Image: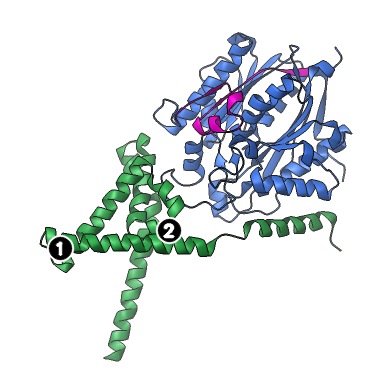
Amino acid sequence: MKTNEQIMKDRFEERRKKMTSDRPWVKNALIAYLVGGALAVLGQWLFNRYMIWFDLTEKEAVNPVLATFIFFACLLTGFGVFDKWSEKWGAGLIVPVTGFANSVTSSGMEARAEGIVFGVTGNMFRIAGVVLVFGVVSAYLVSFIRVLIETLIN
Amino acid sequence: MKDIKQTWMFNNPVYIEAAASVSGPKEKLGPIGRFLDKSFSDLYCGESTWEKAERALMKEAVTLCLGKQSTQVDDVGLFIAGDLLNQNVTSHYTAREYPWPYLGVFGACATSMEGIAIGAMSIQSGMVSRVLTAVSSHYGAVERQFRLPLEHVKQHPKTAMRTVTGAGAALVSTKRSPIAIRSVTIGRVVDWGMKDPLDMGQAMAPAAFDTFKKHLKETGKTENDYDLIITGDLSMFGSRQFLELCEEDGFYITDRYLDGGNTIFGYHPEGFAGGSGAACSALVLYGYVFHKMRSEHWKKVLCIATGALFNPLTTRQKETIPCIAHAVEFELADGLEE
């Protein structure tokens, strides 16, 4: 036999699930796909241009393109518009290095009142640190597996 | 088990002598913007950090509140203040500038009514004759402490609430004034197992309901005795849950119900579910509701300020969010016998 309060709690939970479950997954994914794709096209265009303008090889042209992306992500974060854009356009905007750049800049900016050492530098990797650790660990694991498979085949 | 008393009625009426509300830029644009005493046009309020900006807000609210009835600084016997930052820093720094004995209180977003309740009770005891209460919250400072940096990219779930930037101050006293405090109900901590810190409205709804029910039971009143029942910051989802809970228990209050979080920015602002924060109930009550009471639009008002007593560390440790609600009953003093 359920108590009165338990019945109320169950009904409460039911309503809560009904009200909050309809997150627009498909719409969000579609927007992210389109915006991310557009950014990739822009990156490719820059890549081609850089090869012509600065006379670079295909290998050398990758880093300047990334640097351009990072530079603009940081600049726009500083102006306070990057978070507003990403609210509208979703994850597509942050999947290239721009998301990482934004997390470093925003955390650093926020702590500027606490000084250079313990404020800005100390907080820069507050959020980005997670990405770094998991990035390094997964890169290590994947290359380990690759080497393992290669040795097995040979 | 014996029911523990939670409501205290005041035989000798205690009054709200003056109240002041100061806000940031977004709140000014909301529907209650024109009832606020002062609004800063910039989130920094002319300071260099969010924390200093919040201090400026509270200082301004205290100054304006004293100025309204030209109360002298030494007329005030006790200062009760609270905010959302760690260790109540904003209140401490504000209290540093005045000679009053000071109590720092924390009830998350319920701090405004907690301050008034303690103030009214200390006046009733006859120890002091004037108590100043103040609360503040600041969007930037709170986001930084509880969530992520402001400029960090994120998409809010639709239940997320935007913290109100602002401060409210109220002078509680024995001097006869238009608005009287009739009773206070101190809430108990209620936890129905909600874990999402971005959905505080629904977590707080059971606490509001618990206090509301207790208040009606102990004062012997019905919901129809009030012209307005206002909750602090339940916002869209929380206020719906609150109304549903009330209806399940047989209280039909939809026609006399208002929620601070739904009111402050207008309905559903920019993808947020509404406003929250300690200043939310303060701005709506001190600015809008008191104004309407003075013009006799509403005569009896019950304000239930709700607070989610969570901590960013414990929510990350997968703990549930305990919530609290304090209710204060206001009445237009004309209806009171001398």
Task: Supply the letter of whichever chain is green.
Answer: A
For the residues labelled 2 and 1, the Cα–Cα distance comes to 29 Å
- Residue A81, given in percent of the width and then of the height, sits at 38, 44
Q: Nearer the N terminus, badge 2 or badge 1?
A: 1
State which region is magenta. Answer: B14-42
Residue at x 55%, y 41% (from the top left corner): B162
Within 10 angstroms of label 1, few (less than 14), some, or many (20 or more) residues?
Answer: some
What chain letter is assigned to the residue under label 1?
A: A
The numbered disc on residue B10 is none
Name above or below for residue A107 compared with residue A66. above
Residue corresponding to mark 1: A51
Quadrant holding the C terminus of chain B? top right
Residue sitting at x 84%, y 57%: A3
The hue in which chain B appears in the rendered picture of the protein: blue
Q: How crowded is mark 2: few (under 14 residues within 10 Å), some or many (20 or more)?
A: many
A144 vs B208: above or below: below
B18 in magenta: yes
User: Secondary structure under badge 2?
Assistant: helix
Q: Which of A13 and B293 is in front in this view?
A: B293
**Residue B103 visible to an observer of this rendering:** no
**Label 2, on which residue?**
A91
